[in-house]
Image (cartoon, grey):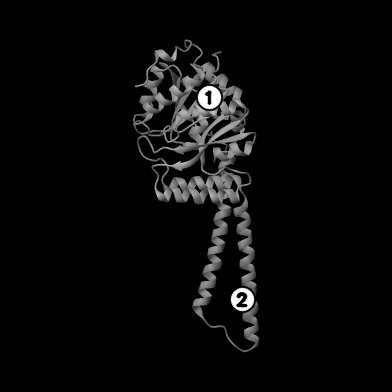
Amino acid sequence: MAQAPFLSIVAPCHNEEEGLREFCRRAAAAAHSVTGDAFELILVDDGSSDRTWEIISDLAADVPQVLGVRLLRNHGHQLASTAGLSASRGERVLLIDADLQDPPELLLMMMPIMERGADVVYGQRTRRQGETWFKLASASLFYQALSKLASVTIPRDTGDFRLMRRRVVDILLAMPERDRFIRGMVSWIGGRQVALPYERDPRFAGTTKYPLRKMINFALDAITSFSTTPLRISTWLGMMSAGVAIALLVYTFVRWLEGETVTGWSSIMAAVSAFSAIQLICIGIIGEYLGRLVQESKKRPMFMVETIVRGSEQSELSIAFSEMSASDKRAALDAAFASEEPPRSQKNGRIG
């Protein structure tokens, strides 16, 4: 069995051909400065349509610490991150995006904090460069709403950029939900979690992979995963609507006893429309939760790996890989490359 590295760096990639080599150069340099050669760099191709996988394969052939994981299709950022974490073997695991908005060099500051006893060291953004006012405003609104609705404390202005101990990663991987919100799940695990403030850089290259539609879906996943408050809100709306309806009925009956008819077609239609809207909102909220229960009950694989590559050797993993226990996943990875030679020194590899 191959010796497990001390540090794993996990980076989900979707159409990152323009900046991937630079990310690998900086990430490998940061890892080498704190662990020597005892690290692995896991690049997960999340169904890219450009040359991302070709570049990952080239990097794997040039640098022995690079492990490429190609998913069968695009699963989305959270499941691609989960796939990379599932393939990690290190005692410390850094989760980071490949767009270089989160500087890999912050690893040098995170490691000493973890050595002092932290279970998780997460990056907390003090400034977000290169982002539009709409993105900043919507992100602020999202975190404010999430902090009020969530059943656990989820730090504001954080992403998935974080360094975690092995035990935290194993607990995270044991959580079976498909609609994943990793930063919230890590917060739910608990332990000693320490913030590292930093300024987020603009993208090195390419465009954002989170358009408005994905941002809304992501917000819905976050809220429904960590709060049942929307269900209670729908109940309160229903009770308020019932109270207003009873009051209107009493008012109408009293006016009838006084011999006066209630006039005003517009007011009636407005009341009917308001009650109908409240009913549809409540049904929609219930539907969001019910839909997630349906997806969970299907027990489909969380993600599907097409191939993995290390050095010049490619291999395949079982379809059931995503459902394995943490120890079984590491055994499957060791078996996939059982015949490979021991890693060469980082100095013999090249990233260019």
In the foreground, 120 or 177: 120
User: Which quarter of the figure has residue 242?
Assistant: bottom right
Res. 248 mark: 2
Pick the quarter of the image with the N terminus.
Answer: top right
Category of crowding for the residue at label 1, using alpha-carbon neighbours closer than 10 angstroms: few (below 14), some (14–19), many (at least 20) = many
Q: Amino acid at mark 1?
A: Ser
Residue 130 spot, x, y in % from top left:
38, 42
Residue identified by numbered label 1: 88
Residue 29 spot, x, y in % from top left:
43, 22
Residue 321 shows in this picture: no
> SS for tag 1?
loop
Q: Looking at the image, is mark 2 or mark 1 earlier in the sequence?
A: 1
Residue 32 shows in this picture: yes
At horizontal 58% and vertical 43% (from top left) the residue drawn is 154
User: Which quarter of the figure has residue 55?
Assistant: top left
3D distance between C-alphas at marks 2 and 1: 63 Å
Q: Amino acid at mark 2?
A: Leu
In the foreground, 186 or 197: 197
Left or right of 131 on screen, residue 159: right
Category of crowding for the residue at label 2, using alpha-carbon neighbours closer than 10 angstroms: few (below 14), some (14–19), many (at least 20) = few
In the foreground, 42 or 244: 42
In the foreground, 238 or 283: 238
Pick the quarter of the image with the C terminus.
Answer: top left
> SS for tag 2?
helix
Dot in front, 2 or 1: 1
